[in-house]
Image (cartoon, grey):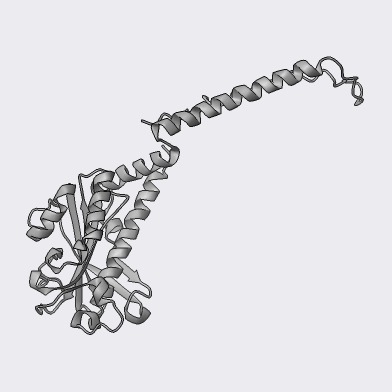
Amino acid sequence: MDLTPGPGSGRPFVFLARPALYDDTTTRLRPVGAWVRPRAAAAAACVVLGLGLIGGAATGSWLTGESDAAGSSRNAYVEAGELWHSVPVDELFPPSIKGEGAGPGGADRTWDRVAVAPDSTCKDAFDPLLRKALAPAGCLRLLRATYADATRSHVTTVGLLFTKADADAMRALRTRFTEEGLDSRPDLMPRPYAAEGTPAADFGDRQRATWTLSVLPDAPVVAYAVSGFADGRVVTDPESAADAMKVGATSAPAQAGLGNDVKGIADRVERGLRKTVTAATEKPS
């Protein structure tokens, strides 16, 4: 509950009569005498009263640990958690994503959406170990889409897992994934979404080549992406996007730029999510 004083409860307005020293018929000031001390005392009393009200409000906010900024953060967190059912799919997963400078060597990339999965629960959406690692946050809803690069030779599934967790639980989950390196373990790769009649038709578990996963610190969302080859080739040694993008990496996924694909798409979808949350929280009530 925000205990910050609302409009009208702050410093009072004091309306004073026209000063006695002003003469309507001349600009000459009248002599100043014994009235100075009472007026000064009244002004001092007003200042003390105003400072007292302001100080009391500040103290109340400090004692409760609340502020306008904190309230905005909570509102943004709640707003983010509700986006899965209130935002058009084209806003979360644009039909086309442009990645200026996102390819190997700073080359430009373009990815076109080829499939959108119906929003669903997390049942069968993750391998058992990843499902177990994400379990503390709970699963509210899962949204996924699959993209292909301009040559239709690479495919990437990007997902947004909306959790049931509060902010503290999400921060704890993020800390665990980061400190224990869970976001770079091949046995914790997300699963792809394949759709018949698209370049991703043969994009199964054995075709996973690179991936990235991020537990967002300021929203009840886990964002991820996983990439592979559209020709259905099996990848025996998948590697994280961070490893595939290292200078001098020689693996097939690295040479093909799959690490850049997966990172570029995930970053832009996550960026779009944050932009949507910001726009929603800035709307006048």
Residue 67 in which image quadrant: top left
The front one of 9 and 285 is: 9
Residue 160, compared with residue 245, is above or below; it is above
Instruction: Say above or below: 38 vs 119.
Output: above
Q: Residue sitting at 29 percent across and 49 percent down?
A: 219
The answer, for residue 126, to whether it is visible in the render is no
> Residue 129: image x %, image y %?
9, 59
- In the image: residue 227, left or right of residue 283: left
Using the rendered image of the protein, determine whether residue 182 is visible from the camera's viewpoint: yes
Residue 187 in percent (x, y) is at 11, 66
The N terminus lies in quadrant: top left
Q: Nearer the viewer, residue 62 or 162?
A: 62
Q: Residue at x 55, y 25 (%)?
A: 53
Q: Nearer the viewer, residue 168 or 189?
A: 168
Q: Relative to 94, does residue 60 appear above or below in the rendering?
A: above
- Asked where in the image residue 192 lies, by quadrant, the reply is bottom left
> What residue appears at the point 9 percent right and 61 percent down from the top-left corner?
127
Q: Work out which quarter of the rendered image holds the C terminus and state it.
A: top left
x and y percent of residue 134 in the render? Answer: 16, 53
Q: Position of residue 235 (x, y in %)?
A: 11, 78
* Residue nearest the observer in this picture, 277 or 182: 182
- Side (left or right) of 120 relative to 42: left
Outermost residue on the front side: it is: 179
How many marks are shown on the rendered structure? Answer: 0
Side of 36 where 182 appears, left or right: left
